[in-house]
């Protein structure tokens, strides 16, 4: 059989994909649902039956779907209760320069365009460590407790100065290890260590360095992922996002991101981060070329990793926003996941991942109304204030870049749940009294309960830096 890695993506037939793994099982929907209701550990076959509402018929059965959602919502209540958590955070990403070529992404700009002599006009940016520090410091005055930073793979990025020397020593570093020295570029991003140290201000929680970035930070060396994460932890890194996961099945990765790390490397990086003492999260980006079996096999990879490590604090399903992405431009996809698929992804994540306590609903991906619905399908966390989100917006997302505490409290109480401000690691929580207004964060190093912004019209203030972005995947 011809590997999809060996053919042009425009040859990919979404109606008849050349995948080995298909959503076919010997299990029945009824048996799978009974196991879920009884709290028994689900198999991949069970998960496939639940996420498809039965492989015995095409399409999603409404009555069966509601039964799955009810089981997941009950499991959520038994596991975490009626609280809905959210965090006061800022996304400060360092650069859009990237040569990886992922076909689901419309965030990146070709790294060549950033070279001082390129003469190419582009909408991207690269920040110096000093600029990152200023942005974080300004946001601390607004009360944030978390900085999330996930960036493109700039060829001049290295872990530290020793790494620069190693990369320079290659005969053809641009081709062999995707490296060009900082002096080639109009702006020097510094090293990963420099950026971590710059953003680690006044004890704010720094959530950064995906497995893909960790791979970039050790390319051309024999360093382990644990080595990389230990050095970054020394510089101020507190936890690592398990993005760059997309679908953790290589036959899917061959189609949507053939230039990215493989599933085994993603797992190894996550294990390295946790061996270095860092908490992690895990994600899935679904609703493109994958099928239901791939989604559940992804959940199996995450559950197995959590069985071994116990360091995953939350699972984040990310519904693919397709409109402005290369996958859509090449005609490979015409839409993302349906509402029913989104609901079932959240629900089966809750039921299958019996060892991950928290499941997140992304208002950036789903919007407010649908995002709240997901809180009744098994999710218990509702993201964070963000203060800036550009990746999903560039891909065609329509749901904004900022969420105030006032909005959070109003929405969460409207569905009869309890609003709770949390820390990144969920270890610190503050239950919010809806009647005690105005609402603002209290867990950040400079937070005092003051509302982060007076109103939504102020979200583009200079201190928020309009170029701060959130790389969801």
Image (cartoon, rainbow, N blue to C red):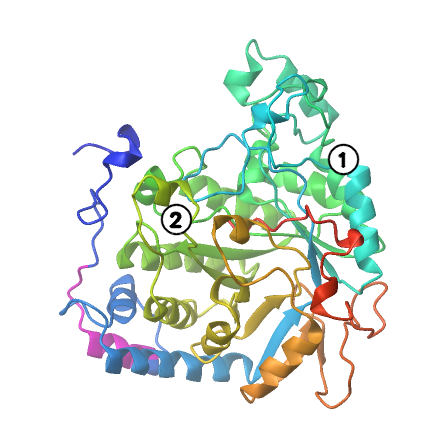
Magenta segment, principal secondary structure?
helix
Q: Tell me if residue 110 is in the magenta stretch.
A: no
Q: Is residue 276 above or below residue 425?
A: above
Instruction: Residue 214 in the image: state x and y as whole percent.
Output: 59, 38
Q: Quadrant of residue 124?
A: top right
Asked if residue 254 shows in the view, the reply is yes
- What residue would you read off at disc 1? 128
Instruction: Residue 210 in the image: state x and y as whole percent.
Output: 57, 45
Q: Tell me if residue 35 is in the magenta stretch.
A: yes
N-terminal of the pair, mark 1 or mark 2, is: 1
Which residues lie in the magenta part?
Answer: 24-36
Q: Is residue 308 above or below residue 348?
A: above
Instruction: Residue 78 in the image: state x and y as whole percent.
Output: 49, 84
| Residue at x 43%, y 54% (from the top left corner) | 321
Would you call the spot at circle 1 few (<14 residues within 10 Å), some (14-19), or many (20 or more)?
some
Question: Which residue occupies the foreground of this view, 181 or 372?
Answer: 372
Instruction: Residue 42 in the image: state x and y as whole percent.
Output: 32, 69
Q: Is residue 238 above or below residue 400?
A: above
| Residue at x 26%, y 68% (from the top left corner) | 46
Disc number at residue 248? 2
């Amino acid at each position: 059989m011809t590997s999809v890695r060996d053919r042009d993506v425009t040859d990919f037939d979404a109606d008849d994909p050349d995948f080995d793994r298909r959503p076919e099982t010997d299990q029945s929907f009824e048996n799978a649902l009974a196991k879920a209701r009884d709290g028994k550990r689900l198999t991949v076959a069970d998960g496939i039956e639940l996420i498809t509402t039965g492989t015995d018929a095409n399409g999603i059965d409404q009555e069966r779907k509601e039964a799955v959602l009810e089981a997941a919502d009950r499991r959520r209540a038994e596991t975490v209760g009626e609280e809905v958590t959210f965090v006061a955070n800022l996304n400060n990403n360092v650069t859009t320069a990237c040569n990886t070529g992922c076909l689901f992404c419309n965030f990146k700009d070709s790294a060549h365009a950033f070279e001082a002599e390129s003469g190419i006009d582009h909408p991207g940016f690269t920040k110096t460590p000093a600029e990152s520090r200023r942005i974080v410091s300004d946001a601390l005055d607004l009360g944030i407790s978390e900085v999330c930073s996930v960036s493109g793979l700039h060829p001049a990025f290295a872990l530290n100065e020793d790494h620069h020397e190693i990369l320079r020593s290659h005969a053809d570093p641009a081709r062999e290890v995707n490296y060009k020295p900082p002096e080639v570029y109009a702006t020097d991003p510094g090293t990963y260590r420099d950026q971590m140290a710059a953003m680690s201000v006044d004890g704010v929680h720094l959530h950064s360095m995906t497995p893909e970035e960790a791979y970039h930070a050790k390319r051309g060396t024999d360093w382990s992922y644990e080595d990389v994460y230990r050095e970054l932890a020394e510089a101020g890194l507190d936890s690592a996002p398990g993005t760059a996961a997309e679908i953790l099945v290589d036959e899917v990765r061959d189609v949507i991101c053939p230039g990215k790390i493989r599933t085994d490397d993603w797992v190894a990086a996550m294990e390295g981060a946790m061996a270095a003492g860092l908490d992690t999260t895990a994600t899935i980006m679904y609703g493109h070329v994958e099928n239901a079996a791939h989604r559940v096999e992804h959940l199996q990879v995450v559950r197995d990793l959590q069985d071994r490590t116990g360091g995953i604090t939350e699972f984040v399903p990310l519904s693919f926003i397709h409109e402005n992405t290369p996958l859509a431009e090449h005609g490979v996809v015409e839409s993302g996941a349906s509402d029913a698929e989104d609901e079932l992804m959240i629900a089966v994540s809750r039921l299958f991942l019996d060892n991950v306590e928290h499941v997140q609903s992304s208002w950036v991906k789903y919007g407010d109304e649908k995002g709240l619905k997901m809180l009744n399908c098994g999710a218990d966390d509702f993201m964070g204030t963000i203060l800036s989100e550009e990746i999903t917006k560039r891909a065609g997302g329509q749901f904004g870049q900022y969420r105030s505490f006032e909005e959070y409290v109003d929405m969460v109480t409207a569905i009869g749940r309890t609003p709770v401000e949390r820390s990144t690691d969920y270890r610190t929580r503050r239950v919010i009294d809806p009647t005690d207004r105005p609402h603002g964060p209290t867990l950040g190093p400079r937070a005092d309960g003051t509302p982060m912004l007076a109103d939504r019209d102020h979200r583009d203030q200079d201190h928020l830096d309009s170029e701060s972005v959130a790389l969801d995947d």
